Amino acid sequence: MRLSVIGCGYLGAVHAAAMAQLGHDVVGIDVDGAKVAALSAGSAPFFEPGLADILRASIGSGRLRFSTDIALVADAEVHFVAVGTPQARGGGAADLTYVDAAIESLLPHLKAGSLVAGKSTVPVGTAARLAERLQTAGTGAILAWNPEFLREGYAVQDTISPDRLVYGLPADDGREHAKAALDTVYASALASGTPVVETDYATAELVKVAANAFLATKISFINAMAEIAEVTDADVTALADAIGHDTRIGRRFLNAGIGFGGGCLPKDIRAFTARAEELGRGESVAFLKEIDAINMRRRQRAVDLVVDALGGSVYRKKVAVLGLAFKPDSDDVRDSPALDVAVQLNGLGARVIATDPAAIPNSIRLHPQLGFATDTMDALHEADAVVLVTEWREYRDLDPVVTAALVRDPVIIDGRNVLDPAVWRAAGWRYTGMGRP
Ligand code: NAD
C-alpha cells in the first residue's frame, strides 16, 4: 500500500520505517528539516534499538523516503497522523495545535476514499471533531483512530508485532472501507494472530489513555507501598514479589523506585484528568492526581536520601548520577525522573557528574549547567555519593568491588532497586534503596 506518515518523531519515524520494512511504500513528512535530513540519510535522529537498520534497509529498497513537502502525500491511500500532543503550557490539558495543523496541511492533498488514520494520543472527542473537519472540507476522505501502544526501547518490535490493534471506526458507510484499508496495512500482524478490537472513535481514544492511566496507577501503587515500607522497615521488593505471584495482580510494573516519566505517561494522565473535568466527570479520575503526586514525591525522596547519606548537605560534594534517560534503551529525557534528580541535586549545590549511554546530548540541550561524563568510570571517580536513576544494563552489572575502589566514599542510592543490597554491602558500600530496609 502507499502510505504517508505525518510527524516523524519517536512514533512516526518508527512507524514509517516499520511499514516500509513490511513491504509498503511510505513517505514520512515532518516540519523539522534537520530530522528529515537525518532520516533521509538513514540515520535515526534518536536512540531506538533496531531503527537505524530498518531505516537503511527500507531507504535502500526505495520503499521509504522522508520530506518536509506535504504535497508528496498526494498518492498515499492511508495517511497516519503521528505528530506530538504535548502538555499545554499552564495546564494539564493536551495541546492539539500540532494535530490540527497536520490535518489542515493534509486537506488539499486528500483523495476521495483515502483514509486518515490518527495515531497520536488525543483527548476523547478529538476524532469526531476531525472527522467533521474532513467532511466539511469536502475531501471525501475517511477518518479512523488507530492508537499506538509501542514502548520506547522496543518500538520496532512493538510496531512490527503489536500485542493488539485498535481500530476506532466511523459509524457510517466509511466503516467497512476504513477497516479494509487498516487490515491491508496490518496484514502481516493479522496473519500472525494479532487480535483486533474494532470500535468507535471515543472508545479507541479512551483505550489509549486508560491503558496509560492503569500502568501509571500500578507504578504509583507500589511506590505508595514503598513509602509505607520506609516507615516500617519492611521491604517493598519482597512485597512486590509476594503480591506479584497472584496472577490477578502480576509482577510486571510493580518495581518501586523513582517513578515514571517520559513523553507519554505523565502528560497522558494529566490530559485525561483535564478532559474528564471538561466532561463533568472529574471525580471519576480524581485518583490520577494522587497517582501523579505519589510519582513526583519519589523523585524528591531520592534527592533526600542522597542529602541524608551525605550528612545533611550535598554542597560541593561530588555526586555521580548514573542515568539520565527516562528509561533504559532510550535517549528520551522528556519529563525524565533521572534528569530531574540530577537537576535538583545540582540546585542544592552538589557537583553533579551525570552519565548515560545515550541521553547526554539531549540532557545537555535542556540542562547545560550539569556536569557530564561519557565514561561511567569518570563519573564515579572520587565521587562522594552515587545515585543510580536509570536502570541501564551496564549500571545493573557494575562490579561493587571495582567501583568501591574508584569513589571517595562508597555511598550508593539505588533509585531503581536493581542492585543486590547484600552484595554491595559486602563490598563495603553504604547501600540505600527505595522502600528497602
Ligand atoms: P515527538 O515529539 O517525538 O514527534 C512529533 C513529531 O511531529 C516531531 O518530529 C515534530 O517535528 C512533528 N510535527 C509537529 N507538527 C507537525 C506537522 N504539522 N506536520 C508534520 N510534522 C509535524 O513525539 P512522539 O513521542 O513521537 O509522540 C507522537 C504522538 O504519539 C503523541 O501523541 C504521543 O503521545 C503518541 N505516542 C507516543 C509514544 C512514544 O513512545 N513516544 C507511544 C505511543 C503514543
Image (cartoon, rainbow, N blue to C red):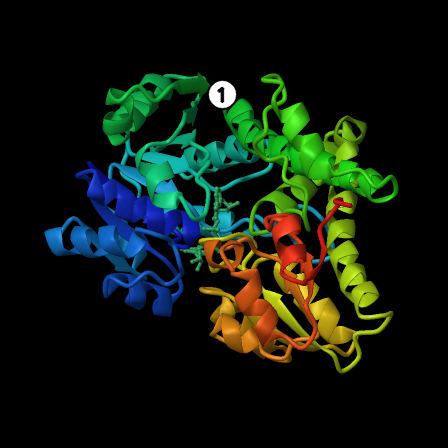
Tell whether 56 sits left or right of 388: left
Vertical comparison of 4 with 398: above or below? above
| Coordinates of residue 356 in the picture (x, y in percent) | 51, 66
Write the residue at 22% across / 44% down.
20
Residue at the spot x=54%, y=32% of the render? 208
Inspect the image, locate mark 1, and give the three-letter code of the amino acid beneath it: Asp
Near-viewer residue (345 or 56):
345
Q: Quadrant of residue 343?
A: bottom right
> 109 or 165: nearer the eye?
165
Q: Tell me residue 39's x, y (percent).
A: 29, 61
Q: Which quadrant of the figure contains the N terminus?
A: top left
Q: Could one spot residue 220 in this view of the protein? A: no
Residue at the image position 26 percent from the left and 58 percent from the top: 66
In the image shown, does 170 or 216 lie closer to the viewer?
A: 216
Q: Is residue 117 visible?
A: yes
Q: Mark 1 = which residue? A: 200
